[in-house]
Image (tube, rainbow, N blue to C red):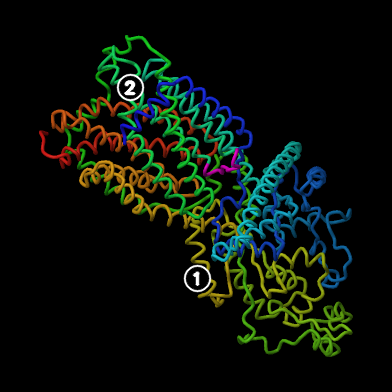
């Protein structure tokens, strides 16, 4: 079978090199024509765990409370915050921002009502007349600043406690079409998960997903342009204040910008460095050009496929380009090194036969190395997170393309690019890998002891591994987004949103303290007595004319949350959250209650709370009540800004402990309270990734072991070949644990990358060892020959990749730096395992039968 395939390959490919190269060139040209369609998707939807109940809750809460995305601009003026030199340009900037397409509203210190400058009464709030604001010429600005820095509404949200910094909140228009397309897709996906889709609904789901994807592209383009426009306007006011721009849309836009920059800038730099290293290693132009041409063809074809299929890259899956470059380069170098060996042995031999022998000898190990590498990346498909799934499938597809391109381009270019016979010099020998062989020969005990020690250290490091995700750590401290997020955390209440949604107790449940509560209708019926109560005369005047019962018999029923027990329960939750070290600003109905108590100068009864619920004007409700209370659901929402810069924040522990405290300490029922928001969603993503990737490594190793058995036909040899891979994967994860580098959505795929690289090295080395051993059945001599031959390919690939990927340390995007360093670490551990531990284990256990050692 193999001979027939070799003969077919020779007849169709190798004997027609120019035709083959022409067809490849046409394919590459066709793929290149699709490159402009490539999209980098950084939408929140692309980074979330599909099917997560918390995601469904998050979307439901967003719809119920009409939450909007927003961009924050911090304004730190050179003059006093409320001086004309600060306020006038602030208003001018806000007016420009309001004129942008996609901006719903802009909130500044100019736009908010003032309740204590001077103090207003409840009658003022409910009358519908305009409340005081900075627009009034005679306003006491010292009093206003005092209110901004002490008010439960404004302090640490709109204005910092020191009164020197304010925030400009740019609310983005809610996209109802996006929401409707998303909801239509999700409803069909729920049916799909339940196995209840009909044929018509299956077609409708495909159509819904296509429409949503197409519209998402437009939304991302518009949002990217809007962020750029906001930045341009803000930059023009830099002479008046120090300004930073922040918010979730900003994070998404900057992540895309940094990834695109790294792909272009560092992609070209890595390619250039690799070219230089190959030139130093091989010292021949053809051995520089041929591998890089094969790599370029692989990347262009794969990227063209992504563009043609609208298969979108994300900030996670964009790493596939670099990993695919490594695999493609390794395949090419293996062919080149093997060809040079054959050429050295028979420099005057037939060129065609030499190339054919190269292909014949390398086809099996290259095929199996690609197959087992693909298995490592297929493990990512079970993650449930679309970018990680895409990364797995992109790598699997890319590996198949790399294998095909390498065995089409490299042999054909070898055929048509002839070189002189004087190819080799004595200076090329002995190779550096000979020193690895000598070390493995002379210090076998030290290698085994060192490996055992590393294994113990690795286990300790893995035990310290953290699953954490801090977006601020993605950026250098010098970048605008880092400094802006740090400022928001320190002085304006935090950055990452968390919502606690609390439902009212069941109707049948006893409500202690509510026995004296009356409906508002009853209160009005008794108003002649009620409004004469001591300390309540003004309140009675304010509300005596309100109509709580309409003429058609309808009556207003106050909510549980506008009762004393509801208020006390909510106050307890609010105050508990406010005391936590990891939290910043907390907003809820409790904030409204605090304002009302302050205005009244006394505690509030249930009836008074009911009157507050009924009588607040629409504009006050829109600002202070509607974002935190749903009368239809009898539900309240507590909005918390969590500090991204908090060193004590461990998201999963924080959320678990918070839920436990709400139930056990504050007395909420388990089914009464739910946590949602971006903090919860990203934590769920991380926990799912950890379970699906780290905890399924055993299954992956099991599958690889089976493939080793098929290839090597020896259980002992297969287990030996697996050992360096286990140690390499463990070492990378262990070093991450020891250095405090957390596993997050950007680094958790490193386990699959380490496996992919390590498996490739071990397959090539063991396969070559099996071919060389029958010559003299001498394990040590065979080791030296393998290090002189296949060892060179492993060494050359490692040096080229390590030097090239070291360039990523110059990036401004920390995930790119981590990826570069971890890839370098993976390459080094894999090659050291293959050249030291693997041959030592083979010599020790003699899996190929008796022989001299």
Q: Determine the image quadrant of residue 539.
A: bottom right
Residue 243 in view (yes/no): no
Q: Which mark is residue 339?
A: 2
* Residue 132, percent from left and from top: 85, 60
**Which residue position holds label 1?**
660
Q: Quadrant of the N terminus?
A: top left
The span from disc 2 to disc 1 (Cα, nearest Å) is: 65 Å
Per the rendered image, the range of residues in magenta is: 308-317
* Residue 225, percent from left and from top: 71, 41
Q: Which mark is residue 787?
A: none
Q: Does the stretch in magenta take in 312?
A: yes
Labels 2 and 1: the sequence-earlier one: 2
Q: Residues within 10 Å of mark 1 (few under 14, many from 20)?
A: some
Q: Residue at x 31, y 32 (%)?
A: 3
Q: Residues within 10 Å of mark 2 (few under 14, many from 20)?
A: many
In the image shown, does 528 or 804 lie closer to the viewer?
804
Q: How many marks?
A: 2
Q: Residue at x 43, y 45 (%)?
A: 377
* Residue 807, percent from left and from top: 47, 30
């Amino acid at each position: 079978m193999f001979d027939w395939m070799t003969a077919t390959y020779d007849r169709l490919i190798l004997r027609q090199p120019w035709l083959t190269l022409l067809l490849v060139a046409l394919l590459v040209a066709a793929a290149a024509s699709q490159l402009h369609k490539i999209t980098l998707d950084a939408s929140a939807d692309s980074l979330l765990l599909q099917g997560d109940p918390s995601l469904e809750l998050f979307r439901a809460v967003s719809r119920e409370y009409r939450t909007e995305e927003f961009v924050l601009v911090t304004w730190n003026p050179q003059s006093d915050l409320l001086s004309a030199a600060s306020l006038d340009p602030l208003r001018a900037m806000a007016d420009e921002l309001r004129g942008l397409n996609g901006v719903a509203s802009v909130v500044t210190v100019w736009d908010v009502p003032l309740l204590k400058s001077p103090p207003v009464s409840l009658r003022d709030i409910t009358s519908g007349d305009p409340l005081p604001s900075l627009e009034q010429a005679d306003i006491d600005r010292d009093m206003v600043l005092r209110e901004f820095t002490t008010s439960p509404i404004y302090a640490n949200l709109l204005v910092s406690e020191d009164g020197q910094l304010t925030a400009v909140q740019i609310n983005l228009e809610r996209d109802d079409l996006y929401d409707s397309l998303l909801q239509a897709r999700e409803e069909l996906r729920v049916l799909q998960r339940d196995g209840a889709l009909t044929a018509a609904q299956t077609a409708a789901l495909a159509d819904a997903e296509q429409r949503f994807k197409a519209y998402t592209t437009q939304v991302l383009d518009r949002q990217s342009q809007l962020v750029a426009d906001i930045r341009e306007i803000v930059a023009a006011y830099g002479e008046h204040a120090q300004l930073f721009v922040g918010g979730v849309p900003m994070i998404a836009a900057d992540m895309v910008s940094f990834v695109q920059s790294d792909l272009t800038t560092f992609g070209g730099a890595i390619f250039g460095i690799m070219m230089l290293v190959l030139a130093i290693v091989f010292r021949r132009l053809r051995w520089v050009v041929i591998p890089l041409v094969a790599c370029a063809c692989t990347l262009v074809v794969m990227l063209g496929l992504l563009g043609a299929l609208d298969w979108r890259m994300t900030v996670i899956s964009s790493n596939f380009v670099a990993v695919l470059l490594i695999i493609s380069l390794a395949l090419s170098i293996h062919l080149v090194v093997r060809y040079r060996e054959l050429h050295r042995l028979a420099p005057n031999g037939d060129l065609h036969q030499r190339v054919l022998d190269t292909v014949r000898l390398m086809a099996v190990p290259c095929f199996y190395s690609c197959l087992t590498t693909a298995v490592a990346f297929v493990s990512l498909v079970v993650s449930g997170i679309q970018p990680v799934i895409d990364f797995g499938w992109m790598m699997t597809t890319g590996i198949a393309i790399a294998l095909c391109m390498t065995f089409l381009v490299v042999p054909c270019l070898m055929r048509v690019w002839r070189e002189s016979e004087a190819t080799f010099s004595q200076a090329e020998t002995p190779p550096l890998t000979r020193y690895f062989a000598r070390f493995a020969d002379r210090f076998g005990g030290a290698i085994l002891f060192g490996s055992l020690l590393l294994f113990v250290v690795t286990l300790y490091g893995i035990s310290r591994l953290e699953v954490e995700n801090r977006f601020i750590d993605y950026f250098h401290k010098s970048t605008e987004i880092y400094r802006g997020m740090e400022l928001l955390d320190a002085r304006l209440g935090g950055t990452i949103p968390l919502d606690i949604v609390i439902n009212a107790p069941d109707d049948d449940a006893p409500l202690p303290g509510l026995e004296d509560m009356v409906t508002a209708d009853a209160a009005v019926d008794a108003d002649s007595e009620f409004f004469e109560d001591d300390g309540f005369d003004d309140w009675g005047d304010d509300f005596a004319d309100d109509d709580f019962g309409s003429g058609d018999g309808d009556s207003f029923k106050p909510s549980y949350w506008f009762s004393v027990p509801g208020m006390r329960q909510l106050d307890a939750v609010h105050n508990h959250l406010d005391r936590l070290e990891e939290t910043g600003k907390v907003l809820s109905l409790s904030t409204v209650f605090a304002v009302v108590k302050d205005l009244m100068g006394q505690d509030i009864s249930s009836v008074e709370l009911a009157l507050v619920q009924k009588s607040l004007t629409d504009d006050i409700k829109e600002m202070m009540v509607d974002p935190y209370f749903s009368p239809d659901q009898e539900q309240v929402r507590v909005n918390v800004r969590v500090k991204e810069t908090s060193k004590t924040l461990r998201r999963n522990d924080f959320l678990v402990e918070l839920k436990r405290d709400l139930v056990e300490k504050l007395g909420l029922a388990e089914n009464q309270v739910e946590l949602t928001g971006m903090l919860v969603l990203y934590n769920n993503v991380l926990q799912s990734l950890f379970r699906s990737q780290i905890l399924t490594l055993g299954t992956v190793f099991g599958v690889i072991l089976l493939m080793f058995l098929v290839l090597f036909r020896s259980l002992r040899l297969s287990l030996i070949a697996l050992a360096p891979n286990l140690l390499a994967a463990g070492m990378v994860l262990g070093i991450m644990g020891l250095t405090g580098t957390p596993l997050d959505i950007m680094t958790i795929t490193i386990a699959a990358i380490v496996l992919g690289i390590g498996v490739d090295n071990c397959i090539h080395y063991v396969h070559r060892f099996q071919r060389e051993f029958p010559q003299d059945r001498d394990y040590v001599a065979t080791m030296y020959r393998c290090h002189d031959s296949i060892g060179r390919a492993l060494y050359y690939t490692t040096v080229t990749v390590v030097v090239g990927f070291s360039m990523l340390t110059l990036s401004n995007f920390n995930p790119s730096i981590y990826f570069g360093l971890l890839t370098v670490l993976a390459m080094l551990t894999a090659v050291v395992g293959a050249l030291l531990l693997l041959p030592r284990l083979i010599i020790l256990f003699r899996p190929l039968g008796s022989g001299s050692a």
